[in-house]
């Protein structure tokens, strides 16, 4: 598909083509999530991933990263604690703060998810040409860099 550029880069037709192609990747991920974490909602899984990435994050930090209000994040954590995958502990600097940590079961659940995802991805990748696999990997790595840069710019703008 030819790429068309507007004044700021690829136009919406390129974004639409990427969106359509990404649906296949998302379907593989969703199937793996259902296989490994069927008892968790997408929001609960996102919360676990944030806590894994930012061990000891407080409730306010988690709510901000998930884009939800504090009371919703608190209820979400209550369910994760009840499921045995998350624990709360008083903060080290301020005992009124609550620090969130994954339990061993939470770590194991995320590892099961990654193993299921990788197995499903490997099956699809095996059907692709080596050049196609390399192009996909290069494009996704560049996409990751651009996404992280965009998030960082957003954080800087909010803190200014």
Image: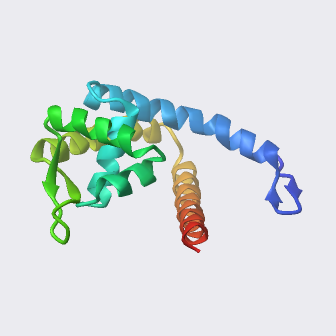
In-front residue for pair 159/117: 159
Left or right of residue 20, residue 155 in this image: left
Count the marks: 0
Q: How is the image coloured?
A: rainbow
- The image quadrant that residue 108 belongs to is top left
Please provide percent x and percent y for residue 61: 37, 57
- Residue at 16% across, 32% down: 82
Quadrant into which the N terminus falls: top right
- The image quadrant that residue 80 belongs to is top left
Residue 83, visible in the rendered structure: no
In the depicted structure, whether residue 25 falls above or below residue 91: above
- Residue at 54% across, 45% down: 129
In-front residue for pair 155/73: 73
Please provide percent x and percent y for residue 132: 57, 49
- The image quadrant that residue 93 belongs to is bottom left
Q: Farthest residue toward the bottom?
A: 160
Residue 91, visible in the rendered structure: yes
Please provide percent x and percent y for residue 90: 14, 58
Quadrant into which the C terminus falls: bottom right
- Residue at 27% across, 30% down: 37
Please provide percent x and percent y for residue 45: 33, 39
In-front residue for pair 156/150: 156
């Amino acid at each position: 598909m030819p790429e068309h550029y507007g004044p700021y880069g690829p136009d919406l037709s390129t974004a639409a083509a990427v969106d359509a192609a990404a649906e296949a990747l998302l379907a593989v991920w969703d199937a793996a999530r259902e296989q490994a974490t069927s008892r968790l909602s997408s929001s609960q899984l996102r919360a676990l991933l944030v806590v894994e990435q930012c061990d000891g994050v407080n409730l306010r930090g988690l709510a901000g990263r998930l884009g939800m209000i504090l009371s919703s994040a608190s209820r979400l954590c209550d369910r994760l604690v009840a499921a045995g995958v998350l624990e709360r502990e008083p903060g080290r600097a301020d005992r009124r703060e609550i620090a969130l940590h994954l339990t061993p079961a939470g770590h194991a659940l995320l590892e099961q998810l990654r193993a299921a995802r990788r197995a499903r991805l490997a099956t699809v990748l095996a059907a692709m040409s080596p050049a196609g696999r390399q192009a996909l990997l290069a494009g996704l790595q560049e996409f990751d860099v651009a996404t992280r840069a965009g998030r960082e710019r957003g954080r800087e703008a909010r803190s200014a």
